[in-house]
Amino acid sequence: MNKFKIVIGIDISKNKLDVCIIEDPTSKQRNYFIVSNDKKGIDDIFKELKKYKVSDSELVFCFENTGVYGMHLCYALQQRNVSYSIVPAIEIKRARGLTRGKSDKTDSLDIALYAITHEHKLSYRKLPEYDLMKLRLLLTEREKLIKSISLFDSTKENEDFLPKEITRNILKINKQTIIALKKQLLAVEKNILTIIKENETIKQQYALATSVPGVGQQTAINLLVATRCFSTFENWRQLACYAGVAPFKYASGTSVHGKTKVSHMANKKLKSLLNMAALSAKKHDKQLKEYYERKIREGKMECL
């Protein structure tokens, strides 16, 4: 706590925020309370913090990544220009060590203690701009529509095995549903392209991404959203780790010699897209194909 005087650990749920405020890490005194997960509740947190007589720059909030449930808090902290860090739940779980039992109160304490003991590891967040948030939501809707179309399309398999009088009406309804879903899919994709064209920064980064051999429209858009236009990660190694394409060695002493492989903790969607991009690139780019074949001969990757 060299940089900040007050650490606030928050366990976020849909309707409430469990708050733990720590001023002195060496003291067992903790300030616990619960507020509603809305603007009023967040205002109540700052009313309580006024008692400590510190400026907003001397505060740090830490909480787990809970998706949309944490958006009220993120917006409020960004508007006040207060530092906050979002930490993966598994990282906090492993940092707390051996524990018995679980409650929202103890979770808020564990989060606050994590922020104190791992201050050197904390990365402070900022919400992505509105257009990137729109793109993220539109990509999610696109995934839902594609899965739904595939699911409804599978009904056709019954046509070859059941009498026509049974399948006729079902297939008619099914066809209408698929047409409607495809229409919505086109509308979503049109909105995505409109956002890209109208935002100069996103448009420029999108053009650069798609200029790479093998990187198509969907891979480029997902990369922009995942990396906030390539501003989230400091280098390509961090991105490779996040996407799950970086291999890690598994060995210990003289007896444990596991296979070098990628981690399962990754953005699986991005990993799949990058894998397809690599397969496409090696077919159309001579240099990449030669590099791929050389690595195969060296035994450094499995043949795809």
Image: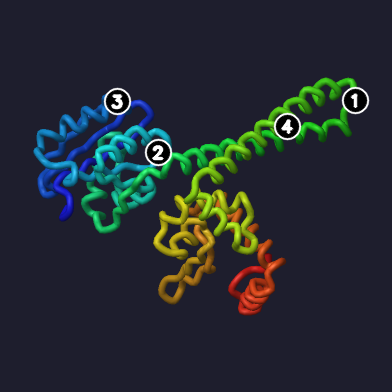
From the viewer's side, name the closer residue of 220 and 206.
206
CA gap between label 3 and label 4 equals 41 Å
CA gap between label 2 and label 1 equals 49 Å
Sequence order check, earlier mark of 2 and 1: 2
CA gap between label 3 and label 1 equals 57 Å
Q: Are marks 2 and 3 in contact (CB under 8 Å)?
A: no
Question: As drawn, is 231 to the left or to the right of 22?
Answer: right
- For image coordinates 47% across by 43% down, the residue present is 132
Kindly tell me whether residue 146 is visible in this rendering.
Answer: yes
Mark 4 sits on what residue? 152
Mark 3 sits on what residue? 36
Sequence order check, earlier mark of 4 and 1: 4
Give the percent coordinates (x, y) of residue 114.
Answer: 26, 49
Sequence order check, earlier mark of 3 and 4: 3
CA gap between label 4 and label 1 equals 19 Å
Against 229, residue 152 (above or below) is above
Where is residue 39, by image quadrant? top left
At label 1, counting other C-alpha atoms closer than 10 Å, the crowd grade (few under 14, some 14-19, many 20 or more) is few
From the viewer's side, name the closer residue of 24 and 209.
209
Against 13, residue 246 (above or below) is below
Labelled disc at residue 242: none
Q: Looking at the picture, which amino acid does disc 1 mark? A: Pro
- For image coordinates 65% across by 57% down, the residue present is 276
Q: Looking at the picture, which amino acid does disc 3 mark? A: Ser
- For image coordinates 65% across by 75% down, the residue present is 287
Kindly tell me whether residue 97 is visible in this rendering.
Answer: no
Against 275, residue 286 (above or below) is below
Is label 4 or label 1 in front? 4
CA gap between label 4 and label 2 equals 31 Å
